[in-house]
Amino acid sequence: MTIEAELLEINDEAVGTRLDSFLASRIEAISRTRLQRAIEDGDVLVNNRVVKASYRLRVADQIEIDLPPPAPVELLAEPIPLNIVYEDVDLVVVDKPAGIVVHPGAGIESGTLANALVYHFNELSGVAGRIRPGIVHRIDRETSGLLVVAKNDQAHENLSDQFRDRRIFKMYVALVYGQMAKERGEIEANIGRSSINRTRMAVLKGGAGRPAHTIFQVDRRFQELTLLSVEIKSGRTHQIRVHLSHIGHPVVGDMAYGQGRENTVQDVKTRQRIKSLGRHFLHSSRLAFEHPTSRERMEFSSRLSAELESLLEALR
């Protein structure tokens, strides 16, 4: 998944202006309230650090925004099949296959989940903008599994609040390289854009980047690989992949954060199966949240796709 962001540099005229005011004047398509929330969530960095909305800009400040401006395309309805797990008047829960991008952006104008959503549903929330109708959160292109989509603005705002307050439960299944030293562990390390490769993310030190918290539990050990259940308390770009790679156990099949690691696998058949997988082994398996209207606790689960289950069966 291509990382989408905008980089802004401050000139003399903007010096002394509040950060939220400056962004509102430069990004007209996004409301000031949403910009303030993005700043609060750590999705806006100044000089690679999280600051408050009231921060006064200085000469040569560099602002990084992880909210892309609207893409210069019209969102076309496309008859792409959807695996709908649940639907009511407020929301839809879908099970996304690997290989589909959640919404258009950076060179991708069609074939996305958003294109499919506008084809299948007459009404979706507009909070996230015209090319991201109903999109409350994202998962990477090659990650499969559960996503919740809002049908109206009220539901969208409520679900966004739950994500921001970390009240939504998100559990993933990940197969990683190597043997984990512990049965259970937590990773708390800031994530930001890599200074070496700007299309990738990395763990940053010294207070730079955005706070991120990942919890993992060993489900099963194989000879050279480990199957994990992974819960994320935050939702940073590529969070699970970056954190697990940071501790020396990249996700199997991950070409961005674990490329070449498959060549270290000693078993020839296993190595060949990994290379032919065509995706990384990461699946959004469980999702739980409070219904935005009824306040009922909703819980959903998703089974591994055939190609992931086939690899596990071969390992067993």
Image (tube, rainbow, N blue to C red):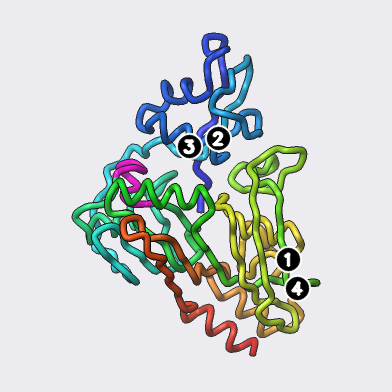
Image position, residue 8 (x, y; %):
54, 26
What residue did someone put label 3 on? 37
Depth-wise, is mark 2 or mark 4 nearer the camera?
2
Image position, residue 119 (x, y; %):
22, 58
User: Which badge, 2 or 3, is on the more N-terminal residue?
Assistant: 3
User: Which badge, 1 or 2, is on the more N-terminal residue?
Assistant: 2
Q: Look at the magenta stretch and give its main secondary structure.
A: loop
Q: Amino acid at mark 2?
A: Val
Residue 44 shows which numbered tag?
2
Q: Is residue 78 left or right of residue 252?
A: left
Depth-wise, is mark 3 or mark 4 nearer the camera?
3
Q: Amino acid at mark 3?
A: Arg
Q: Nearer the viewer, residue 274 or 160?
A: 160
What residue did someone put label 1 on? 185
Q: Is residue 59 above or below residue 35?
A: above
What residue did someone put label 4 on? 178
User: Is residue 131 on the magenta stretch?
Assistant: yes
Q: Tell me the element at label 4.
A: loop
- Distance between the alpha carbons at the discs numbered 2 and 4: 35 Å
